[in-house]
Amino acid sequence: MGVANAASRVEVRDLLYGALVGNTLAALAVAYALLAGISITQPRYALYGLLWIFVGVLVLWKTEPAPADASTRRRAAAVALLYFVALAVAGGVVVTAMRPGAGEFGVRLATLAPGWGPAPVFSSPWAALVLMPARVVGYAALAYLVYATVIDASGAAVSGLVGLFSCVSCSWPILASLLSGVLGGGSAVVAATFDFSYDISTVVFLLTVALLYWRPFVGGHFGQKE
């Protein structure tokens, strides 16, 4: 009974903390939209952005990588860092000079939809950083899950399989760009693709989080202690 009561208290506490995070995000989004004078014509985009942040915060809060030696932790951290950089470059957080966004030295604040904005933009002639909150928090959560996965896999080949699958969420912008180049910018298929790119990337993000959270390829999920 004592264990059951303790577990129940933990679940209630987690629900309360989750509700607090959600309510805080909603209040900040409303305040930001009012202060920035943003007219939200597509509410689902704002909802997706807030969902990325909400899920990302929960993942970073609840993730408990398994104990490991220093060498394994360093290897896992290196893989997670490279993965985050790949996500950032493919997902538009890091914009190179070959893509729109890079230009002269400068700092500005992009007033995007709540969740995606406000986004500080640091530009240079070679590259630019577009710090969209949803992308930064979401990619950090995915990278941390990859860190925990590599530790669990302990160098097994399966960790590469999970990492490759999870990279679908960062590869989508590249696939969409390739599709646009092949079919032409005016194609109805391309128009539909970009219309639903946020929908698809959000679904893939959530699916990736779920797979890396429970890790069916590795066995067990983070936070589970043997």
Image (cartoon, rainbow, N blue to C red):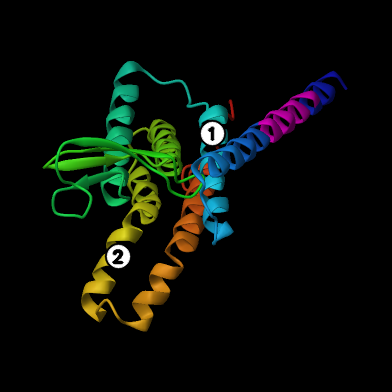
Per the image, the residue denoted by label 1 is 57
- Toward the right, the furthest residue is 1
Q: Which residues are magenta?
A: 9-20
Q: Pick the quarter of the image with the C terminus.
A: top right
- Is 11 covered by the magenta stretch? yes
Answer with the quarter of the image where residue 81 lies. top left
Q: Position of residue 125 (x, y in %)?
A: 11, 42
Note whether residue 76 is visible: yes
Instruction: Say what amino acid the circle numbered 2 marks.
Output: Leu
Do the numbered discs 2 and 1 sit on residues whose CB atoms are within 8 Å?
A: no
* Residue named by callout 2: 175
User: Can you say whether 170 is above or below 142 in the image?
Assistant: below
Q: Is residue 8 above or below residue 30?
A: above
The image shows residue 93 at horizontal and vertical percentages of 31, 44
Disc 1, SS: helix
Residue 216 seen? no
Secondary element at tag 2: helix
Image position of 192 with respect to 28: above or below: below
Residue 1 position within the rendered picture, expressed as x and y whole percent measured from the top left: 88, 22
Which label belongs to residue 67?
Answer: none
